[in-house]
Amino acid sequence: MYVVVIKAMVTDTSSLSGKRILLIIGGGIAAYKSLLLIRLLNGAGASVRCILTRAGAEFVTPLSVSALSGDKAYIDLFDLTDEHEMGHIELSRDADLLVVAPATADLMARMATGQANDLASTALLATDKPVLCAPAMNVRMWEHPASRRNMAALRQDGVLFVGPEEGDMACGEYGPGRLSEPEDILAAISSVFVRKTTPGALSGRHVLVTSGPTHEPIDPVRYIANRSSGKQGHAIAQAAADAGADVTLISGPVNLGDPKGVRVVHVETAGQMLEATEDALPADIAICAAAVADWRPVSATNSKIKKTAGTEVPELQLTENPDILKTLANHPTRRPQLVIGFAAETDDVLKHAQEKRLRKGADWLLANDVSEQSGVMGGDSNTIHLITGAGVDEWPLMSKQAVAERLVARLASALEDGTPKIDAAQ
Ligand code: C5P
């Protein structure tokens, strides 16, 4: 099959026009790429103000930074002139987004522990704006448990990430740790500002969303489940409602509040989820974001299975659950105009997801990497490959909310085109 891959490089950067970026340049050999990033940001209509860490200033000169950004390069916390002109609080408050590129191991450690011992870390601690990190460091430093912990803590705090990439490193080693290319960092920055969907863009449309895991009972106290948090499905339901859609959310058991302005049906099992989904038809769009259990115990016992000394370990007999996405996509009479699925994969993400789209009969499939190192499961961000009949669109790492808004914007424009069936799977 011929697949067109649209690289992040061609991402629309119009959302950057008029945006103010505070770029924090850490001290690593990759700092030279930040100079190109300044140019790219300026070219996309954003203004850039730069903070150099002391080590950053060893790799790129304040003169180059200031010549490219058209502003002075800020370095010192205790520079009274700066405090008079533009203090560290104003520096971070005056920006729409803080970008740390390269984010070195040291800077990430200081961010993760809330230190404020230079201008860069102080601005990062003082900000109430989103922060995007582009890490770059030696592969062993990147893989060190301390860096893993810091990365996890920063993700937990809502910091967004782009990269690092895998490849040859300046130190002669090979592996993950290379700073993402400036074009990819630019794409990640612009995705933060993707315009919220126009209010009313989906008005008059009924959007059906499945979300969360399912629980398949073994007995009254035990069940089979999975790690899905429901964050992505719930964010989509919210974004669709914000765009004026009439939304029915069929939710498995999650620790999330119901999205506002959405009709929510709470279910436990895959069987109940299918029933609730079919009851909610007709719909214009169905988005199956739930992580439905593939199998369920053949029959759940009515009383708790006892663990009795000397008796054999009970055998669990499983049977296949109904496939909700496939059922909707192949519905003989009430197939939604657009049926969208997710594919959570741990390896060969694109290949498996493309096969899945065809096998299930979905129009679009959003594939994401849920391997342990991706931090997607239960986390707040996601890297999506949108697979349609026309090819693959690679989205940079973004928050689950931004994924939801981008998907809804895409749905609105697809439906606006009036194409009755947008990307029929074949
Ligand atoms: O087959 P797999 O679970 O990887 O497929 C993922 C996609 O299929 C998701 O969109 C999920 O919501 C949907 N699905 C479903 N019913 C199932 C299994 C998966 O709707 N029983």
Image (cartoon, rainbow, N blue to C red):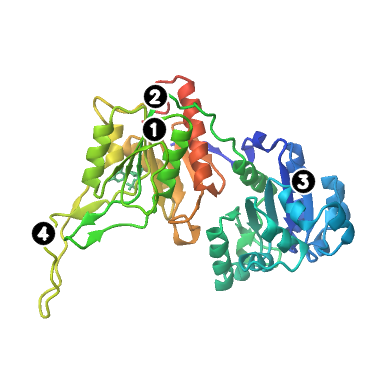
Mark 3: amino acid: Val
Mark closer to the chain start, 1 or 3: 3
The answer to whether residue 322 of the structure is visible from this angle is no
Quadrant that contains the C terminus:
top left
Mark closer to the chain start, 2 or 3: 3
Mark closer to the chain start, 1 or 4: 4
Please name the residue that numbered disc 3 is placed on: 48
Please name the residue that numbered disc 4 is placed on: 302
**Labelled pair 4, 3 in contact (Cβ < 8 Å):** no
Give the quadrant of residue 157: bottom right
Give me the disc on residue 421.
2
How far from the left and from the top, in percent, is residue 358? 35, 37
**Labelled pair 1, 3 in contact (Cβ < 8 Å):** no
Identify the residue at image location x=50%, y=42%.
403
| Depicted 335 relative to depicted 237: above or below | above
Q: Distance between the residues labelled 1 and 4?
A: 41 Å
35 sits to left or right of 212: right
Q: Which of 384 and 240 is in front in this view?
A: 240
Give me the disc on residue 363.
1
Identify the residue at image location x=39%, y=46%.
343
**Labelled pair 2, 3 in contact (Cβ < 8 Å):** no
How far from the left and from the top, in percent, is residue 90? 76, 52
Identify the residue at image location x=54%, y=29%.
198
Mark 2: amino acid: Lys
Quarter holding ligand 1: top left
